[in-house]
Image (tube, coloured by chain):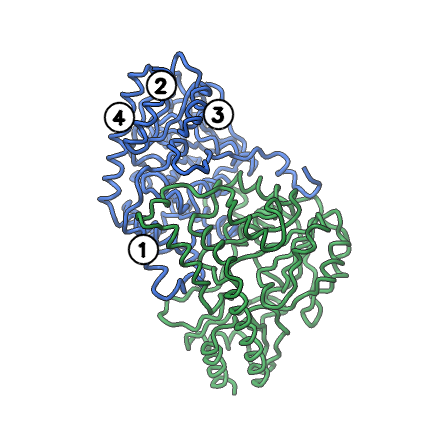
Chain colours: A green, B blue
Amino acid sequence: MSRFWSDIVHRLTPYVPGEQPALAHPVKLNTNENPYPPSPRVVEAIRRELGEDGGASLRKYPDPTARALREAVAKHHGLRIEQAFAGNGSDEVLAHAFQALLKHDKPIAFPDITYSFYPVYAQLYGVEYETVPLNADFAIDVDDYRAPGGGVLLPNPNAPTGRALPLSEIEVLLKANPDAPVIIDEAYVDFGAESAVNLIDAYPNLLVVQTTSKARSLAGMRVGFAFGDPALIEALTRVKDSFNSYPLDRLAQVAALASYEDQAWFEESCAKVIASRETLTAQLQALGFDVVPSAANFVFAKHPAHDAAALAAALKAKEIFVRHFKLQRIDQHLRISIGTPDECNALVAALNGLIG
Amino acid sequence: MSRFWSDIVHRLTPYVPGEQPALAHPVKLNTNENPYPPSPRVVEAIRRELGEDGGASLRKYPDPTARALREAVAKHHGLRIEQAFAGNGSDEVLAHAFQALLKHDKPIAFPDITYSFYPVYAQLYGVEYETVPLNADFAIDVDDYRAPGGGVLLPNPNAPTGRALPLSEIEVLLKANPDAPVIIDEAYVDFGAESAVNLIDAYPNLLVVQTTSKARSLAGMRVGFAFGDPALIEALTRVKDSFNSYPLDRLAQVAALASYEDQAWFEESCAKVIASRETLTAQLQALGFDVVPSAANFVFAKHPAHDAAALAAALKAKEIFVRHFKLQRIDQHLRISIGTPDECNALVAALNGLIG
């Protein structure tokens, strides 16, 4: 507390990301990182940008519009560059979207159980919101979002549940809210859900947010995108250009671009994660866990006989990190990121020792 | 314009950074980039972070607190880590400062001629401000900032004038505004002004903002800092953690840290820029320009007989880029970044052809 703080600072309850343990070899299944490295082309592209001449390009500002990157990613999705926005991670993209598109007189709506950064953004920008309860099985019922409001924000698949909505349901949402932005946060879409990017030309109220942090193994480089009607993208650009001229550094731009040039690597690494998810789900079920059907690179699981917080702590003592949220309705669940087969096996072995 | 835009988006007039020409070999003296590359240790550090194993670290999130970097930079300045904040370029740091520290009931004050991003931030966050005219010779008179307001924001040296204030004058400002934040934007401090970091322990209202983009040749990596009382740093951190968990990517963190480990390179490159500035100043004066005394890596110059916009356009036709601002009081000035001796000579030769 300080007399120099603005009112907003006093009111904030900042977001707390998953722990980054300072251990040599933790089994780190708590922040939904990809267990596989990015495409070798990413590293090549960074080395190329560094050049033979001692990083001389680093002295120069990056392209403030990230044109080459936006062009490549737009093309990847069959979109035009005017339909693509790039930011410093999808967290930053979402923050700009709250300020640029979700701040209206009417409250916005998002699920009661979802990415816990959403209420933090709302607080930061003074955006009124209502939370809509998930069904008992943690499914989103799009009929619950039919009352016209200031906008709708949903992850698909949802986090931390992992459940996906079919595209037909997203379309119901878009039709029910023609005068408000509908933002679909597709951080995890590549692990088993359908992207809504193909609906962009038909729905001027649709904004799709994506990231290179999960399926493209670039969490360390902080690159996120929004795709939508050019008017929505312009709103984000106006805010971004009033906040920070150059959000993406040179190496982040070339790294992300290179990732989109290696479709085979991307598909293979997604396939490996999906295969491990199915194996882990079966193993957890064999241990007695209820596992929510996941279309993401994590599973959300609950054991009827063992307290989730106690399990997370016991795993942590073995240097195995999973995520536990002290939140209503989900305080008996663990969110477990899909690691390599070895990491998943280490988790299962540890759980076996604890509860088997 | 769109019905989906928030009110704030309609009102914004975004900042426009200097042009990044898509030419093979422009003489680029328009964005105050350093003409020399960063320390070789920066490139080594990035290569080390990429590792032998194909960029495997890139799949993992960076340290959200940038602890190692903040610790090193704080130590460099004789400060504690709690007195240091790191962000995605000093533009982002300043944006957070507007929201966290400058948004109060009373208006803030900054010079009428200064970094033109300041009024844009004010607009974005609804911060009331008053501009204080520079003297006729573009000097800041600190006595003009004695009326207690919501805060004071000054670059030292000022941009685009290049004029520096002595530390004793900064102290006058701090004493005259004990109940409001005084933010000194030291983007250009290393080229000839005194940093106010040593005043931080004595003045809880002082926030010093710095960047690696200029003297450290890392414009391409987007790393900036704020230094101040822990309460001020906490305010910035609370806003940052409500906006984007991980602003600095892994490579930016290691690159910036390595730059602070090579003091000799830093000093040598500053010395070269300063020497070129003095040479260029004399050459411009010989051509009849009035040159404001500069403590930065640029000069601000006006020719009594030649229109500045016309000169900038004529130089651009020769692929020499300088910055011209269509703003009151300075629309007859050019802001010229200090390039290599060759680049400065190319500029002088071109000016000779145009007006000599």
Residue A323: percent from the left, percent from the top? 51, 69
Q: What residue sits 49% from the left and 68% below the top?
A: A30
Measure how far apart labels 4 and 2 are at the Cα level.
Answer: 22 Å
Say which mark, if any, is on residue B131: 3
| Label 3 chain ID | B
Residue that mark 2 sits on: B353
Front-lying residue, A214 or B111: A214
Specify whether residue A133 is in view: yes
Specify whether residue B321 is in view: no
Residue that mark 1 sits on: B45
Say which mark, if any, is on residue B278: 4
| Label 1 chain ID | B
Measure how far apart labels 1 and 2 are at the Cα level.
Answer: 44 Å
> Do discs 1 and 3 share a chain?
yes
Residue A152: percent from the left, percent from the top? 69, 54
Q: What residue sits 60% from the left and 63% below the top?
A: A189
Callout 3: few (<14), some (14-19), or many (20+) C-alpha neighbours within 10 Å? Answer: some
- Nearer to us of marks 1 and 3 is 1
Measure how far apart labels 4 and 3 are at the Cα level.
Answer: 31 Å
N-terminal of the two: label 4 or label 2?
A: 4
